[in-house]
Amino acid sequence: MERYWEANGVVTAPTAPSSSSGNYPTDGNVVSGESPSTPGAWWFHMVTEEIRAVLVAGGSTPDFTNVNQLLTAIKSLITSNSLSSIQTQALIEQYAGQAIQLTGSSNTFTGAVVPAITANASLGEPVTVFFPSAITAAATINLGGGVTALVDAQGNAFSTTNTVPSGNSIVQYNTVLSKFQVLGLGGIDQVARNSAAQALSLIGGSNFAATNWSVKQVGTNLMFSYSGANKAYLDTSGNMHLAGDVFINQTF
């Protein structure tokens, strides 16, 4: 299919009309005096160009002697878009399955995913990274999409009281914040945040003064202490182990 007129075609496209009578076409009615509809040059041009655009998008070269190009182009577009979606999903899953070894220190880290990215949003899903040193202050990370701020799961900057130990952690790019968030430590629930205030809020301990509590990682466990005394620890399976007496609906 291509622009074709048996006779009297011109080299300049018709100009779009400023208005349309709309509604539906009619053959007219001689008895009632109703005139038949006239499509006009613009209608023929509009329909031709709409179809022609699909052919070009589908990779075809318009040919007025070929009457099946529209079907071929539509099939090509469907196949191309489906394959693109499958490839994109496979790439996201591939990124999610990688363990990325980071380099750097002083809270500035660099790593690379395979295949390489130029935009952080390309990662899609959370990825596992290995921090060679602890995060103890405002930090950045560059996985190929440029130097980007690194924050905790609540969007807060890291500090001496809000840290991440060296080792594996799960990070994800937040497109709203335009920052990478540390969602949790490798093998440990997100509550493993070295900030007593945040940890207590996550486990519903708002009735306790955060200044009296401390939370720290001991081996692979998370230890909760009150005024220097160990009170409980959380293991990697999410089980809470309590030390000493347990009081129901009371303070201790």
Image (tube, helix red, strand yellow):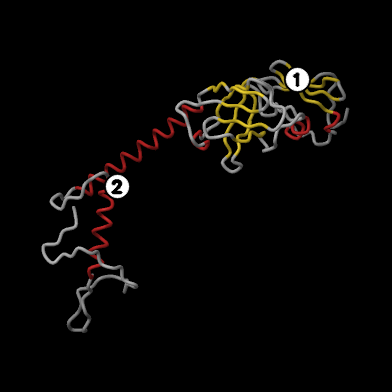
Instruction: Give the side of residue 93 with respect to residue 235, left or right.
Output: left
Residue 230 location (% of width, % of height): 82, 20
Disc 2 to disc 1, C-alpha distance? 62 Å
Residue 218: quarter of image:
top right
Q: Are marks 2 and 1 in contact (CB under 8 Å)?
A: no
Tell me the amino acid under the disc marked 2. Ala
Give the label, 2 or 1, closer to the camera: 2
- What residue sits right under mark 1 in the picture? 241
Quadrant where the C terminus lies? top right
- For label 1, the crowd category at 10 Å Cα-Cα, with few meaning under 14, some 14 to 19 and many 20 or more, is few
Instruction: Give the side of residue 217 with respect to residue 37, left or right.
Output: right
- For label 2, the crowd category at 10 Å Cα-Cα, with few meaning under 14, some 14 to 19 and many 20 or more, is few
Residue 82 location (% of width, % of height): 35, 38
What label sits on residue 114 in the rendered view?
Answer: none
Q: Nearer the viewer, residue 238 or 150?
A: 150
- What residue sits right under mark 2 in the picture? 57
Tell me the amino acid under the disc marked 1. His
Question: Furthest residue to the top?
Answer: 219
Dot 1: element: strand
Count of marks placed on residues: 2
Q: Residue at x 60, y 30 (%)?
A: 141
Instruction: Give the side of residue 131 with respect to residue 54, left or right.
Output: right
Instruction: Give the side of residue 204 with respect to residue 147, left or right.
Output: right
Question: Furthest residue to the left?
Answer: 6
Q: Nearer the viewer, residue 9 or 28?
A: 9
Residue 105: quarter of image:
top right
When the figure is inspected, residue 31 is found, relative to residue 70, above or below; the finding is: below
Residue 2: quarter of image:
bottom left
- Among numbered discs 2 and 1, the one appearing first in the sequence: 2
When the figure is inspected, residue 20 is found, relative to residue 149, above or below; the finding is: below
